[in-house]
Image: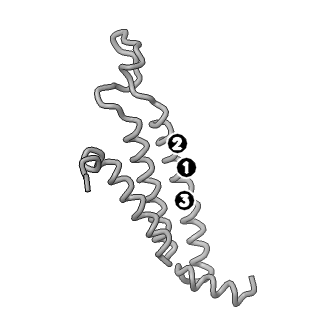
Amino acid sequence: MNFSGLLTNYEEAIAMILFAIGFSNLLLQKNLIKKIIGLNIMDTAMYLFLALKGYIAGRKAPIVVDGVQSVEAYINPIPAGLVLTGIVVSVSVSALMLSLTIRLYRRYHTLNLDEITTMLEKEGL
């Protein structure tokens, strides 16, 4: 088996491992806070991957300096913009999920999703 591609692209491998950790956490945990943490790990892995794909070695940020206007001298700013936008959306979604989790805890006095589902079935909802 040839691992040379993995060693040269270890950053992407780390991003995929982080995504897998977050995804498995999201699927396997019963605690709602742990599920939110898993989703945040997945988000972070995607931002890392996008940032890595947007970076090109030897190029600079797209700010014209010293009159250099060649496209080949600069990186593409779109992945960085996507990452910043994603971070803002992720923080908003995390805040909403945490506020809903607090409401669930105040009502059912547990963060275990199975127990909450059982209580909902008993209530007839």
Label 1 belongs to which residue?
89
Residue in front for this viewpoint, 76 or 125: 76
Is 63 drawn above or below residue 100 in the view shown? above
Where is residue 68 shown, x and y percent of the image? 36, 12
Residue 85's disc is 2
Residue 18's disc is none
Residue lying at the far front of the rendered structure? 1
Query: Of the residues shown, which amino acid type is indicated by label 2?
Result: Thr
Quadrant of the image containing the N terminus: bottom left
Where is residue 111 shown, x and y percent of the image? 53, 79
Q: Secondary structure at mark 1?
A: helix
Where is residue 21 shown, x and y percent of the image? 39, 64
Q: Are marks 2 and 3 in contact (CB under 8 Å)?
A: no
Q: Secondary structure at mark 3?
A: helix
Q: Earlier in the sequence, mark 1 or mark 3?
A: 1
Quadrant of the image containing the C terminus: bottom right
3D distance between C-alphas at marks 1 and 3: 10 Å
Query: Of the residues shown, which amino acid type is indicated by label 3?
Result: Ala
Q: Secondary structure at mark 2?
A: helix
- Decide: few, some or many residues near mark 3? Use Cα within 10 Å; few <14, some 14-19, many ≥20: few
Where is residue 118 shown, x and y percent of the image? 63, 87
3D distance between C-alphas at marks 2 and 1: 6 Å
The residue shown at (35%, 48%) is 12
Q: Earlier in the sequence, mark 2 or mark 3?
A: 2
Q: How many callouts does the rendering have?
A: 3
Q: Are marks 2 and 1 in contact (CB under 8 Å)?
A: yes
Query: Of the residues shown, which amino acid type is indicated by label 1?
Result: Val
Residue in front for this viewpoint, 92 or 121: 121
Label 3 belongs to which residue?
95
